């Protein structure tokens, strides 16, 4: 074995040698050791040893270069710093050509083949201020009431979105993209008479062509986009090009396959759709407005067990509404408002009076399985009695509890028809007063979740139907976009 003899000398005489002699001796010994190594290790081995060391140095260098730097703050962290109230993200509102939205309002006389729709789309979709409610609504909150149309939600949502606290002007920072196309107002004028399938689809195709030119739409194929449909989902689901078939084919157009949609009644088997509450007449300006109305309906003296607001549909065979109307008019425990003689479509104080005066309200299916009147009924603290499972099952899941029995009563429509309506009284009379009070309290607590507040007003800690909807939409879109880019 090779050894280097560099041990210290122990002789006391060496301690007095000069430093120069020590250095000379050490240099001599190192040189001697080096020559000893060279004499015992072949030159080729030294070359390979040197190459190995150099390779290890190079590998270490590239590993250091390729390691990621300290990560910057995430996009969500950066956005949260912009507005702490926007934890679900930010929404970018497309500035569509006027032909897709505001032009419908400017030409409101053309929206309906039978009557003007100008009042319905006025005041940002709220409609005209409500009148004749002096004996029905507390005086200091009557300015918060409007005769709001059941199909005005797309105008209301657009108006609210423009002043929303989480709206952002930079599309690169947006979590979701809102498409303010008034598809419901567009299709409304083409649903009847001799219009063709092309007539019903024209504007829908045009707006999708416009979107396909936007990089923000094409980069993720629309998975982070959403639209509000003011009418029932069925008005946008025409399956063929047959001119006699109902509605447009908007939801089946290829560019819509990833776009999330909101509507007042959704298709229960469509995962890309969610239903939102129908607009009612009450649009609170403050949390105080809500609390005052909640106390008012909680303490209201109700004199009838149940009520029915509606009209017979004579042209429909075995019309169920006719069964309810005939029974209600014959039953002293029921208060009937016949919309064949009372104008109900543009708002009527008699409707709210009937719901306020009754513990329960009868709610058959409307144009679809759901009905705007159901929300008017709940707004008055009256408990809905419904007759088709689909009226609540799978609908309004973001806004109402999934356990509908905690605030509603279900009676099968076939059983009601078999008894000419008398089963209704039997069922409702069996519900104890304490249970009725409990169900009403559930409705009262839910109330803020199914009303749409006045834009620009502060509801404090309360979130209305719009706030809840947009919060859930942005969370949904963020998740979908993350999955899209991860896959």
Image (tube, grey):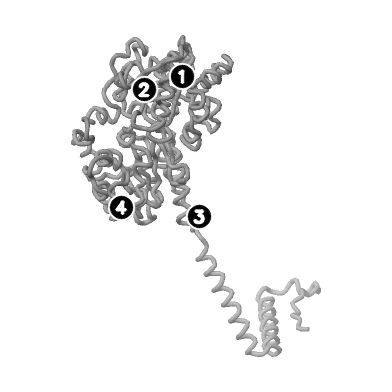
Which label's residue is closer to the chain start, 4 or 1? 4
Residue closest to the eye, 477 or 344: 344
Q: Quadrant of residue 86?
A: top left
Label 4 CA crowd tier, 10 Å (few <14, some 14–19, many 20+): few
Identify the mark nearer the N-term, 2 or 4.
Answer: 4
Q: Nearer the viewer, residue 219 or 447?
A: 447
Residue 262 in percent (x, y) is at: 39, 40
Can you tell which of label 3 and label 4 is closer to the viewer?
4
Task: Using residue 77 as the reference point, say whether residue 254 is left or right of it.
Answer: left
CA–CA distance in space, label 3 to label 1? 56 Å
Discs 3/1, front: 1
- Circle 3 residues within 10 Å: few <14, some 14–19, many ≥20: few
* Residue 237 x, y percent position in the rendering: 36, 46
Task: Assess disc 2: are there few (<14), some (14-19) or many (≥20) residues with their C-alpha within 10 Å of its C-alpha.
Answer: many
Task: Kindly indicate whether the residue at mark 4 contacts the one at mark 2 (C-beta within 8 angstroms).
Answer: no
Q: Which residue in the structure is indicated by mark 4?
A: 241
- Residue 381 shows which numbered tag? 1
- Disc 1 and disc 2: Cα gap in Å? 13 Å
Q: Given contact means CB atoms under 8 Å apart, are the residues at marks 1 and 2 in contact?
A: no
For numbered disc 3, what is the local secondary structure? loop
Q: Position of residue 397 (x, y in %)?
A: 49, 35
Label 3 vs 2, first from the N-terminus: 3
Q: Is residue 408 above or below residue 92?
A: above
Mark 3 = which residue? 70
x, y percent for residue 376: 40, 23
Residue 197 position (above or below residue 81): below
How far separated are the C-alphas under marks 2 and 4?
Answer: 40 Å
Crowd rating for badge 1 (residues with CA inside 10 Å; few <14, some 14–19, many 20+) = many
Nearest to viewer (mark 4 / mark 1): 4
Assign the N terminus to one quadrant of the image: bottom right
| Residue 268 drawn above or below residue 19 | above
């Amino acid at each position: 074995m090779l050894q280097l003899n560099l041990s210290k000398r122990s002789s006391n005489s060496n301690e007095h040698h000069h430093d120069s002699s020590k250095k000379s001796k050490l240099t001599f010994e190192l040189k001697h050791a080096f020559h000893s190594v060279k004499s015992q290790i072949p030159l080729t081995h030294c070359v390979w040893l040197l190459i190995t060391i150099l390779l290890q140095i190079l590998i270490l260098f590239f590993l250091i270069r390729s390691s990621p730097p300290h990560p910057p703050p995430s996009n969500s962290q950066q956005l949260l710093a912009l507005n702490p109230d926007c934890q679900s993200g930010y929404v970018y509102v497309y500035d569509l050509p006027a032909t897709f939205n505001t032009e419908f309002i400017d030409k409101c006389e053309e929206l309906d083949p039978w009557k003007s729709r100008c009042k319905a789309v006025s005041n940002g979709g709220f409609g005209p201020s409500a009148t004749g409610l002096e004996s029905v609504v507390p005086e200091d909150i009557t300015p918060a009431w409007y005769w709001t149309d059941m199909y005005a939600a797309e105008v209301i949502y657009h108006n609210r979105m423009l002043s929303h606290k989480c709206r952002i002007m930079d599309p690169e920072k947006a979590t979701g993209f809102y498409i303010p196309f008034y598809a419901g107002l567009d299709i409304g004028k083409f649903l009847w008479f001799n219009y063709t399938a092309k007539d019903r689809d024209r504007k829908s195709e045009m707006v999708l062509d416009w979107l396909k030119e936007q990089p923000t739409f094409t980069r993720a194929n629309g998975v982070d986009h959403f639209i509000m449909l003011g009418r029932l989902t069925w008005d946008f689901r025409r399956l063929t090009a047959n001119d006699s078939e109902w509605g447009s084919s908007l939801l089946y157009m290829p560019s819509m396959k990833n776009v999330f949609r909101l509507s007042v009644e959704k298709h229960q088997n469509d995962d890309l759709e969610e239903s939102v509450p129908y607009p009612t007449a009450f649009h609170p300006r403050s949390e105080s407005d809500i609390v005052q109305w909640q106390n008012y309906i909680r303490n209201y003296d109700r004199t009838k067990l149940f009520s029915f607001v509606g009209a017979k549909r004579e042209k429909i065979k075995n019309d169920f509404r006719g069964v309810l109307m005939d029974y209600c008019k014959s039953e002293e425990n029921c208060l009937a408002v016949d919309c064949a003689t009372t104008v109900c479509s543009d708002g009527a104080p008699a409707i709210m009076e009937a719901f306020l005066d009754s513990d329960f309200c009868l709610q058959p299916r409307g144009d679809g399985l759901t009905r705007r009147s159901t929300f008017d009924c709940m707004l008055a603290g009256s408990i809905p009695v419904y007759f088709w499972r689909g009226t609540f099952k799978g609908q309004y899941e973001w806004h109402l509890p999934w356990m509908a029995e905690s605030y509603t009563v279900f009676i099968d429509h076939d059983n009601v028809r078999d008894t000419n309506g008398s089963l209704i009284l039997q069922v409702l009379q069996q519900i104890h007063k304490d249970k009725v009070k409990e169900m009403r309290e559930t409705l009262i607590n839910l109330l803020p979740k199914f009303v749409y507040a006045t834009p620009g007003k502060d509801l404090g800690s309360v979130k209305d139907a719009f706030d809840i909807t947009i919060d859930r939409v942005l969370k949904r879109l963020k998740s979908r976009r993350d999955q899209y880019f991860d896959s």
